[in-house]
Image (cartoon, rainbow, N blue to C red):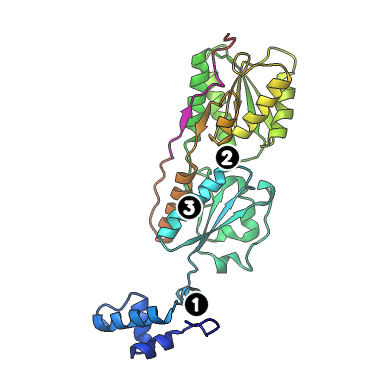
Amino acid sequence: MAAGSARPTSRDVAQAAGVSQAAVSLVLGDKWRGRVSEPTADRVREAARELGYRPNLAARNLRLGSTRTVLLVVPALTTEFFAGVYTGAARVAAEHGFGVVLYPSPEGIGPARDPFASAQAALDGVIASSMAADALTAIRGDQLPLVMLDSDPDGSTGAATVNLDIRDGVRQVAEHLLGLGHRSFLHLAADIPSWTFEVRARELAEQLAAVPGTALRTAPAPISIDGALTAATAALSAPGPRPTALVCDDDKLAAGAYKAARRLGLRIPEDLSVTGLDDLALATALDPELTTVRLDAELFGERGMQALLAVLESRTPPRDDIPVTLVTRGSTAPPGAP
């Protein structure tokens, strides 16, 4: 097609192929079998290729009552974890002809401005992290087919939930530290009111309570290195026996804990064992490298999109949690190890 010329229409294709516009629509919509002969279909496709014709997908979707667009609502993009979730969701979406719009909730909490004139008119469904659930009301996403990530499956507002096996991840951390001989613990806990962090706190407390002679203190902290530095410094400087193991809800919290330990003259792992959760790139940038729980963010996103597709097709998505793995590195050792 020459530069500056008008975009070819289905009428142009019909004229070039010597058929009706209805036949063009059937062929290019792949609904021609039994209604249009194969030679005619070949002629229509060839005419469309020669003219450089592209169907107006927006108009087609409007006629079908579907935009084939999904909104992924996540907390503020402060780590690569949610980028991985997006990558996985977008990959599955593309395989099924869907697009994914990524929408970070401001500051990770609170209501969000509706990114569309009407989310219900612009979207087929929503995938949302429970950490950003407050954004759903503002964008009316809770009135669309909804899949919740990291959400209580028994109390979720969504049509389906997809979870990582966070409970098992915390169990693996506790067993690892207890096995090394630790009995005095500090939990550096994310101060975000979210189901996933409630699960982590509850599971850690239950695992430690089952072993006689253990002690557990909790220090809430924002999910930021500076916030963790402040909270960990205060907790490790508090009166009484100093913990020998520090369990962090997130690798960024662990990075802040490293800084606090160094400022207090504590060696990791000789004086203080530290664990994280996520296995971000940051985990191997720390020295010593961080013992942490690996979460497969891309698989998480894939499963979220697969669950939404099942909901849109009136199928029941699987409810099994995604396994997680403890990765043991140099930040943990027996208490008082030389």
The Cα–Cα distance between marks 3 and 1, rounded to whole angstroms, is: 25 Å
Residue 252 image point, x, y percent: 63, 34
- Circle 3 or circle 2, nearest the eye: 3
The Cα–Cα distance between marks 3 and 2, rounded to whole angstroms, is: 22 Å
Q: Which disc, if any, is residue 109?
A: none
Front in this rendered view, residue 132 or 84: 84
Residue 250 seen in this snapshot: no
Does residue 115 appear left or right of residue 329 in this picture? right
Residue 219 image point, x, y percent: 68, 27
Residue at the spot of label 3: 89
- Kindly identify the residue that appears in the image at 64 percent across and 53 percent down: 135
Q: Are marks 3 and 2 in contact (CB under 8 Å)?
A: no
Amino acid of disc 2? Trp
Q: Is residue 305 magenta?
A: no
- Kindly identify the residue that appears in the image at 71 percent across and 29 percent down: 229
The tag earlier along the polypeptide, 3 or 1, is 1
The tag earlier along the polypeptide, 2 or 1, is 1
Give the quadrant of residue 94: bottom left
Residue 283 image point, x, y percent: 56, 31
Does residue 23 appear left or right of residue 193 in this picture? left
Main secondary structure along the magenta-highlighted residues: loop
Amino acid of disc 1? Ala
Amino acid of disc 3? Ala
The stretch in magenta equals 322-333
Residue at the spot of label 2: 195
The tag earlier along the polypeptide, 3 or 2, is 3
Q: Is residue 325 magenta?
A: yes
The Cα–Cα distance between marks 2 and 1, rounded to whole angstroms, is: 41 Å
Residue 254 image point, x, y percent: 62, 29
Residue at the spot of label 1: 59
- Mark 3 Cα within 10 Å, few/some/many (few <14, many 20+)? many
